[in-house]
C-alpha cells in the first residue's frame, strides 16, 4: 500500500500545476496548492515513519523492474529530505503574502502557483528517484521553475539575477548530464544502485575520475559552494520574499543530498576520501565560505542580501560536515540541512513581514521597528540567535555535532575555526538587532504609522521560530534521523 | 595511446570538446544577452553530441529489426548490429530541456530589454550602478 502512495509524492504536485493553469482562479489556486502541499507533507511523514530503523520502500514505474525500468526508492536519507522539503513548502505556502508577487497581475496569479508546484515537484523528484538521468530531468524542472520564480521580484534587477542564475544553473545542469553520461559509458546502466554496484572507481581510470569531477562541479554550482556561489546573493535578495524563503529552505538542501549521494553511494567513501582525498579541496573551500561569506554579510546594508551571504556561509558548514566523512560529522551536516532550513526560512518570512509593513528592508529603514513590530522582531531575534548557534536553538545542535565530527577526525584547527566563524555571525546578527531595537528612526523616515504584521504572515514565521527552539531542545527527529541517514550513506546505501 | 593516435581514434570527442569550449567561451566573454543564450545552446549541443557519439557502434545501423517475409517475426537468420538506442532517447529529453531553457532565457532577455532599454550586460550593470 505505502509504495503506491510513494509515487503520489511527485505526481500530485506535477498534476496540480496544470489544474491551476486551467482553473485560473487565484483564490482557488492558493488554497488548492496549499492542500496539495499538505498532502505531500502527510505522505512524506508517513514514509519517514515507515522507513525509520532501516526500511526501504521501492516503486517500479510502469511495472518495469529495475535496472531497466525507473525505480522510485525511499530510505531514511530520501525520506528525511522529502519531509524537509514538504514541511518547508507547507509553511511557506500557508504564508499569506497579500497579493502575491509584485510583477504578477491578479489575472495571471494562477500561473505563479503552477510554477511553484512544478518547482516542488522537481525537488521531490530529485530526492525520490533511483535513476540517474531521471535526476537530471527533475533537476532541470526545479531549476527552470526557480528561475521563473526569482524573476518575479519587483525590482528590475530581479530579472537580471534570474538570467544570471539561469546561465549558471544550465552550465551546472549540463556538467551533471555529462557526468551521468560518463558513468553510463563506464557501467552501461542508469539505475543508481546498479551503477554503484558495477562501478569500480580507481585513480587510473580517467573516465571515472572525470565523471566524478563533472558531477561534483555541476552539483556545486547548484548548491552554491564557495566560490561558485555568485548567483545566490542576487537571486535571493531580488526574488519575491516568499520565494526567497522557499528556495533558501529547500533548493540548496536537495543539491546537498545529491552531492552526498554521488560521493557516498555511487563512488563510495573509500575512493573519494581515501584515494582521491577530496576533503583536501572541500575542507578549505568550506572554511573560506564560512569566513569570507560571513564577512561579506557584515558589510551588507540590505537585510535580504545579508541573509543570502549568510546562507553561503551556512552551506560551508554543511560541506564541512560532508568532508569529515565520519558518521558524526556527516550527521552534523545533514541535520544542519533541516536546522538551517528552519532558521533561514523563518528569517526570510520575517523579511517578508517587514517588507509588507515597512516597505523596505534597508538597514537604515529598520531603525526603531523593534517597538512598532515587537512580534516580528522577536522572531527575527530567535532566528538570528540560531544562526549564531546559541544553546537552546537548532544552530547549536548542528554546530555541536559538526565540531564533534571534526574533532573525531583530529582536525583541531578546523574546530577552532568553526567557533571563530560563529563570532562573525554574532557581528552581523548583532548589527541588525542593534538597529531594530536601539537606534532611533531617522527624522526623514518616521515609523509611527508602522503596525504589527497581519496574523496570516506572522503565524508561519512564528511556527518556524518556535521550531527553531523546539528542535534545539529535542533532537530525536532531527539528529536521530540524520545520524541514521549518515550511517546509511557511509555504508554506501541510499 | 600517443597523441596522434588519440587524435585520429577519438576525433569525435576532440571535436565536441572544442565545440563545448567555444560555447562556454561565448557565455563568458560576450556581453550581449542573446549571444550568451546562443553560447549556452552550443554548450548544450556539445553535451548532446557526446551522448550520441557514445551510442555509436562501429558498423551499426538504426535500431530497427528488419522484416523478413520468409521468417515472420524473426531476423531472417542474420545478425543485425545496431547503435545503442538508449542515449538517443535520453537526448530527446535533453533537447526538450534545452528548448525550454532557451525559451525562458529569451523571455528574460526581452524583459531585461524592456526594463533597462538594452540587451548588453555591461550597459545594464552600468545602469544599475547609476540608478541603484
Image (tube, coloured by chain):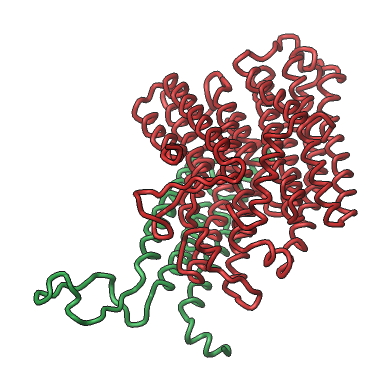
Chain colours: A red, B green
Q: The N terminus of chain A is located in which quarter?
A: top left
Q: How many marks?
A: 0
Instruction: Look at the image and tell me whether residue B74 can be seen.
Output: yes
Instruction: Look at the image and tell me whether residue A157 can be seen.
Output: no
Quarter of image, res A248: top right
Residue A153 rendering spot, x and y as whole percentages:
57, 32
Closer-to-camera residue (A437/A366)? A437
Relative placement, left or right, of A332 versus A265 is right
Closer-to-camera residue (A240/B73)? B73
Name above or below for residue B86 compared with residue A205.
above
Relative placement, left or right, of A362 versus A199 is right
Quarter of image, res A18: top left
Which residue is found at the position 59% from the left and 29% from the top? A242
Residue A463 rendering spot, x and y as whole percentages:
66, 22
Name above or below for residue B72 compared with residue A436.
below
Which residue is found at the position 85% from the left and 17% from the top? A440
Residue A392 rendering spot, x and y as whole percentages:
81, 29
Q: Residue furthest left?
A: B70
Name above or below for residue A322 compared with residue B71.
above
Which residue is found at the position 66% from the left and 49% from the top? A224
Closer-to-camera residue (A450/B38)? A450
Name above or below for residue A397 compared with residue B62.
above
Residue A347 rendering spot, x and y as whole percentages:
70, 29
Amino acid at each position: 500500500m505505502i509504495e503506491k502512495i510513494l509515487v503520489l509524492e511527485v505526481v500530485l504536485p506535477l498534476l496540480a500545476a496544470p489544474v491551476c493553469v486551467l482553473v485560473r482562479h487565484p483564490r482557488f489556486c492558493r488554497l488548492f496548492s496549499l492542500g496539495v502541499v499538505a498532502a505531500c507533507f502527510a505522505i512524506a511523514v508517513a514514509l519517514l515513519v515507515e522507513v525509520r530503523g532501516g526500511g526501504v520502500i521501492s516503486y517500479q514505474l510502469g511495472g518495469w523492474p529495475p535496472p531497466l525500468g525507473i525505480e522510485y526508492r525511499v530510505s531514511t536519507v530520501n525520506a528525511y529530505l522529502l519531509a524537509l522539503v514538504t514541511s518547508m513548502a507547507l509553511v511557506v505556502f500557508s504564508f499569506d503574502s497579500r497579493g502575491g508577487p509584485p510583477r504578477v497581475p491578479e489575472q495571471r496569479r494562477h500561473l505563479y502557483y503552477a510554477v511553484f508546484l512544478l518547482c516542488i515537484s522537481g525537488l521531490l523528484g530529485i530526492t525520490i528517484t533511483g535513476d540517474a538521468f531521471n535526476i537530471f530531468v527533475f533537476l532541470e524542472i526545479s531549476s527552470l521553475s526557480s528561475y521563473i520564480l526569482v524573476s518575479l521580484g519587483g525590482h528590475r534587477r530581479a530579472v537580471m539575477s534570474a538570467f544570471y542564475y539561469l546561465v549558471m544553473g544550465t552550465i551546472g545542469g549540463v556538467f551533471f548530464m555529462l557526468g551521468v553520461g560518463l558513468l553510463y559509458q563506464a557501467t552501461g546502466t542508469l539505475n543508481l544502485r546498479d551503477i554503484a554496484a558495477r562501478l569500480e572507481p580507481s585513480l587510473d581510470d580517467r573516465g571515472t575520475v572525470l565523471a566524478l569531477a563533472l558531477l561534483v562541479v555541476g552539483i556545486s554550482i547548484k548548491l552554491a559552494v564557495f566560490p561558485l556561489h555568485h548567483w545566490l546573493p542576487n537571486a535571493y535578495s531580488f526574488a519575491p520574499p516568499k520565494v526567497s524563503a522557499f528556495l533558501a529552505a529547500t533548493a540548496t538542501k536537495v543539491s546537498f543530498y545529491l552531492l552526498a549521494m554521488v560521493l557516498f553511494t555511487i563512488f563510495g567513501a573509500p575512493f573519494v576520501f581515501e584515494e582521491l582525498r577530496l576533503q583536501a579541496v572541500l575542507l578549505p573551500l568550506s572554511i573560506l565560505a564560512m569566513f569570507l561569506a560571513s564577512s561579506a554579510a557584515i558589510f551588507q546594508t540590505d537585510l535580504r542580501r545579508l541573509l543570502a551571504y549568510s546562507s553561503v556561509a551556512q552551506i560551508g558548514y554543511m560541506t564541512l560536515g560532508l568532508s569529515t566523512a565520519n558518521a558524526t560529522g556527516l550527521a552534523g551536516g545533514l541535520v544542519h540541512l533541516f536546522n538551517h532550513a528552519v532558521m533561514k526560512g523563518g528569517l526570510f518570512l520575517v523579511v517578508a513581514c517587514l517588507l509588507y509593513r515597512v516597505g523596505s528592508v534597508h538597514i537604515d529603514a529598520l531603525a526603531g521597528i523593534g517597538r512598532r513590530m515587537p512580534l516580528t522582531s522577536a522572531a527575527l531575534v530567535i532566528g538570528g540567535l540560531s544562526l549564531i548557534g546559541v544553546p537552546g536553538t537548532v544552530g547549536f545542535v548542528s554546530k555541536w555535532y559538526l565540531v564533534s565530527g571534526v574533532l573525531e577526525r583530529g582536525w583541531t584547527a578546523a574546530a577552532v575555526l568553526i567557533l571563530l566563524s560563529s563570532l562573525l555571525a554574532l557581528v552581523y546578527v548583532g548589527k541588525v538587532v542593534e538597529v531594530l531595537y536601539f537606534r532611533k528612526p531617522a527624522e526623514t523616515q518616521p515609523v509611527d504609522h508602522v503596525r504589527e504584521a497581519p496574523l496570516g504572515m506572522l503565524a508561519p514565521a512564528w511556527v518556524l521560530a518556535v521550531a527553531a527552539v523546539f528542535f534545539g531542545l529535542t533532537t530525536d527527529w532531527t539528529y536521530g534521523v540524520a545520524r541514521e541517514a549518515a550511517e546509511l550513506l557511509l555504508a554506501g546505501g541510499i | 595511446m600517443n597523441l596522434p593516435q588519440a587524435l585520429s581514434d577519438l576525433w569525435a570527442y576532440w571535436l565536441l570538446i572544442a565545440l563545448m569550449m567555444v560555447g562556454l567561451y561565448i557565455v563568458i566573454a560576450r556581453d550581449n544577452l542573446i549571444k550568451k543564450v546562443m553560447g549556452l545552446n552550443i554548450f548544450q549541443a556539445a553535451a548532446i553530441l557526446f551522448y550520441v557519439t557514445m551510442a555509436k557502434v562501429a558498423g551499426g545501423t538504426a535500431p530497427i529489426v528488419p522484416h523478413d517475409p520468409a521468417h515472420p517475426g524473426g531476423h531472417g537468420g542474420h545478425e543485425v548490429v545496431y547503435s545503442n538506442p538508449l542515449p538517443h532517447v535520453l537526448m530527446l529529453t535533453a533537447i526538450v530541456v534545452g528548448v525550454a531553457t532557451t525559451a525562458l532565457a529569451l523571455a528574460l532577455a526581452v524583459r531585461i530589454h524592456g526594463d533597462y532599454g538594452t540587451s548588453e550586460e555591461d550597459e545594464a550593470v552600468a545602469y544599475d550602478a547609476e540608478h541603484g
